[in-house]
Image (cartoon, grey):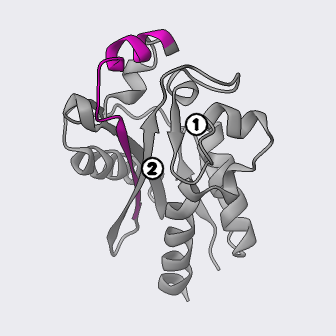
């Protein structure tokens, strides 16, 4: 089974993917190229553009990932802009913005994309959660303190990590599991 390069500067995403790939017998390598991502609302276009740029830089089979966070009560905001929003928003900012919402659903769309000299493959997996009414937990970024995912037993994402839950076994790692299954079949 050939090694696969994952272009990401996010050590947390790499760690999760690496655990899942290792369990499947695939060696995952990290490359941290600085890729200028396009800014727009179409998350699939963003990940495909990122993938094409990563492939042009590596000139070998490569994988990239991007996540989009849609708050239903805010019409899908922040969508693919979550990474940027996290530079400004504190947990209190998220709570203030969503305090009056009755629709507190969150959909996280995980995009995992692969390219080699033959194909470009994109896998899309959606995960659901909810915006909490109070920040909880210590781990991670501001959004992780105010969002609970459906399979996390009402714990904030932060609390899940604070309690030592291995991110590679969480439901939100399903996209990685789906991708590695596809990759093994594709390269067999």
Going by the image, does 138 lie left or right of 142?
right
Residue 27 locus on image (x, y percent): 70, 66
- Residue behind mark 2: 65
Residue at figure coordinates x 29%, y 25% from the top left: 101
Residue 106 in the magenta stretch? The answer is yes
**Is 46 left, or right, of 169 in this rendering?**
left
Tell me where residue 151 appears, x and y as whole percent: 57, 54
Give how far across and how far down residue 103 sits, in percent. Answer: 29, 35
Asked where in the image residue 122 lies, by quadrant, the reply is: bottom left
Q: Are marks 2 and 1 in contact (CB under 8 Å)?
A: yes
Q: Is residue 164 left or right of residue 63?
A: right
Question: Quadrant of the image for the C terminus?
Answer: bottom right
Q: Quadrant of residue 88?
A: top left
Q: Which residue lies most toward the bottom here?
A: 188
* Sooner in the amino-acid sequence: mark 2 or mark 1: 1
Mark 2 is surrounded, within 10 Å at the Cα level, by few (under 14), some (14 to 19) or many (20 or more) other residues, namely many
SS class of the residue under badge 1? Answer: loop
Q: Name the secondary structure under disc 2.
A: strand
Residue at 48% over, 10% down: 92
Would you place residue 177 above or below residue 187 in this image? above
Question: What is the span of residues highlighted in magenta in the rendered image?
Answer: 92-114
Residue 124, numbered circle:
none
Residue at mark 2 to residue at mark 1: CA–CA distance: 10 Å
The residue beneath circle 1 is 10
Does residue 57 lie above or below 119 as drawn? above
**Which residue is at the front of the view, 113 or 187?**
113
Q: Which residue is at a point 35% across and 40% down the rendered structure image?
A: 105
């Amino acid at each position: 089974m050939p090694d696969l390069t994952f272009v990401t500067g996010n050590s947390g995403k790499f760690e999760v993917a690496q655990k899942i790939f290792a369990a499947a017998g695939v060696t995952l390598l990290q490359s941290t190229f600085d890729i200028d991502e396009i800014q727009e609302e179409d998350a699939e276009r963003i990940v495909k553009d990122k993938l094409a740029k990563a492939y042009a830089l590596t000139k070998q089979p490569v994988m990239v990932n991007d996540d989009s966070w849609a708050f239903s009560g805010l019409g899908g905001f922040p969508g693919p802009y979550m990474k940027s929003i996290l530079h400004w928003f504190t947990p209190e900012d998220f709570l203030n913005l969503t305090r009056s919402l009755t629709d507190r659903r969150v959909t996280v769309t995980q995009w995992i994309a692969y390219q080699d000299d033959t194909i470009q493959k994109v896998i899309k997996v959606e995960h659901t959660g909810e915006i909490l009414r109070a920040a909880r937990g210590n781990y991670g970024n501001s959004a992780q303190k105010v969002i609970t995912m459906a399979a996390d037993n009402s714990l904030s994402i932060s609390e899940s990590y604070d309690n030592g839950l291995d991110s590679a076994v969480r439901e939100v790692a399903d996209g990685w599991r789906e991708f590695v299954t596809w990759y093994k079949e594709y390269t067999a």
